[in-house]
């Protein structure tokens, strides 16, 4: 761990100057307490650094949570093993999952599934539902959809050859619109108060104001939506995987031997260094002692099921992934389809130029990230993907 300043601690051995400068600007905000923690996967973000943990008193920076509120991971260890997949055409399973779940930005379900109905009813009953209705009236059809970018669904094997189902997604379009509305509200509130900001995306909402209360309501609603969205997708992935292995109507479905579902873009009320704070993890997972978490690598590399070590200086947090090394534009210019095909050998995937910006080398080496995180988490399982499903 590197102490950059008393208000900024860093766990990243790979840290660009621009990322360091951005984190210093955020750490200088007067309501940050006790310090900002940079995770091993830290990289430049909008407003606040991706891979940062930001504790605040009396205020929240909406852009420090980001526009994909509640984005996170879910994993299920099944009863199946590598032998159950041996000799099978895994591109068939790739296709079945791709058809069961809407992929890509702006693509949602055509109708509400039976499994989604109780989840939608739960969301309708929560504070914040009216805000969701006002920005995205058809949000129920978004429940159980993946999105694009670095969101994915994978079938993986651990070191013992056990089959895991693994996915990454958040609060979809409705969460994006809610976040964008409240980021604008924070910018307007700071403008009206005459507050000078080093970056307009550091605009914040002051606790005790109607704007703060409205954001907190929307935030909590979107975080729950994201959690249930992952559950809904996992229901479909388990169904398709069970049928692929056993055949439709024959044999057992998926027995969920171990389940983990965790956010990595979110805010919670937590106690750190003896005081209650609003803790915003922007690209970081909670890693209290004994707490299970998920850290995915990039496509074509390893992912990890971990347990937190409870590092107080890191604000009980750990990295959420590999962290980008190149922007999406730079990655598209730098990497070729032929190289990506070679790197994905042995994996059933989408075979498209649309995924060039997700090339493994567009991200930091995940083994370096995990080495940096040794005092934050303990690795329990290392997963290697055999199926990778993404939206373009």
Image (cartoon, helix red, strand yellow):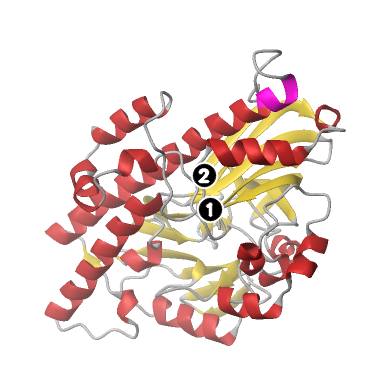
Q: State whether residue 364 is above or below residue 110.
A: below
Lateral position of residue 165 relative to residue 68, left or right:
right
Query: Residue 207 at x, y = what percent?
Result: 20, 60
Query: Residue 322 at x, y = what percent?
Result: 65, 63
Q: Name, please, the residue furthest toward the top.
A: 250
Instruction: Tell me the number on the disc at residue 262.
Output: 2
* Quadrant in which residue 292 is drawn: top right
Q: CA–CA distance between discs 1 and 2?
A: 7 Å
Task: Residue under label 1, please give it.
Answer: 285
In this rendered view, identify the residue nearer to me: 239 or 1.
Answer: 239
In this rendered view, identify the residue nearer to me: 363 or 280.
Answer: 363
Query: Residue 67 at x, y = what percent?
Result: 38, 61
Mark 1 closeness class: few <14, some 14–19, many ≥20 residues within 10 Å: many
- Disc 1 and disc 2 in contact, CB within 8 angstroms: yes
The C terminus: image quadrant: bottom right
* Quadrant in which residue 112 is drawn: top left
The stretch drawn in magenta includes residue 112: no
Identify the residue at horizontal 71%, vertical 65% (top origin): 360
User: In terms of secondary structure, where does tag 1 sit?
Assistant: strand
* Quadrant in which residue 249 is drawn: top right
Lateral position of residue 162 relative to residue 22, left or right:
right
Identify the residue at horizontal 24%, vertical 86% (top origin): 196
The stretch drawn in magenta includes residue 244: yes
Is residue 58 visible in this depiction of the protein?
A: no
User: In terms of secondary structure, where does tag 2 sit?
Assistant: strand
Q: State whether residue 2 is above or below residue 265.
A: below
In this rendered view, identify the residue nearer to me: 147 or 383.
Answer: 147
Secondary structure mostly seen in the magenta stretch: helix
Q: State whether residue 350 is above or below residue 330.
A: above
Stretch of the chain drawn in magenta: 242-246
């Amino acid at each position: 761990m590197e102490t950059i300043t008393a208000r900024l601690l860093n766990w990243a051995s790979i840290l660009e100057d621009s990322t360091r400068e951005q984190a210093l600007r955020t750490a200088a905000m007067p309501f940050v307490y006790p310090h900002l923690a940079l995770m091993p996967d830290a990289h430049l973000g909008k407003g606040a650094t991706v891979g940062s943990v930001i504790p605040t008193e009396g205020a929240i920076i909406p852009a420090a949570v980001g526009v994909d509120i509640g984005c996170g991971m879910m994993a299920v260890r099944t009863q199946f093993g590598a032998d159950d997949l041996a000799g099978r055409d895994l591109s068939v399973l790739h296709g079945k999952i791709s058809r069961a779940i809407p992929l890509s930005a702006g693509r949602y379900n055509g109708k509400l599934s039976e499994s989604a109905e109780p989840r939608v009813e739960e969301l309708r009953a929560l504070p914040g539902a009216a805000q969701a209705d006002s920005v995205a009236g058809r949000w129920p059809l978004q429940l159980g959809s993946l999105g694009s970018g670095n969101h994915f669904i994978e079938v993986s094997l651990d070191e013992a050859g056990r089959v895991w189902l693994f996915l990454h997604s958040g609060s979809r379009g409705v969460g994006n619109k809610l976040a964008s509305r409240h980021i604008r509200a924070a910018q307007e509130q700071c403008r009206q108060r005459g507050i000078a900001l080093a970056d307009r995306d550091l605009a914040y909402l002051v606790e005790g104001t109607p704007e703060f209360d409205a954001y907190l309501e929307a935030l909590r609603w979107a975080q729950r939506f994201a959690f249930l969205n992952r559950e809904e997708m996992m229901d479909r992935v388990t169904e398709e995987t069970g049928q692929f292995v056993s055949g439709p109507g024959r044999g057992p479905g998926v027995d969920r031997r171990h389940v983990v579902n965790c956010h990595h873009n979110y805010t919670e009320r937590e106690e750190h260094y003896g005081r209650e704070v609003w803790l915003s993890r922007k690209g970081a997972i909670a890693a209290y002692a004994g707490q299970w978490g998920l850290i995915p690598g990039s496509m074509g590399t390893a992912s990890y099921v971990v347990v937190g070590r409870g590092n107080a200086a890191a604000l009980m947090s750990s990295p959420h992934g590999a962290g980008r090394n190149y922007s999406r534009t730079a990655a598209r210019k730098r990497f070729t389809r032929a190289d990506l095909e070679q790197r994905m050998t042995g994996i059933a995937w989408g075979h498209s130029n649309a995924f060039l910006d997700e090339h493994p080398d567009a991200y930091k080496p995940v083994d370096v990230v995990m080495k940096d995180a040794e005092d934050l988490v303990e690795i329990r399982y290392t997963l290697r993907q055999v199926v990778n499903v993404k939206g373009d």
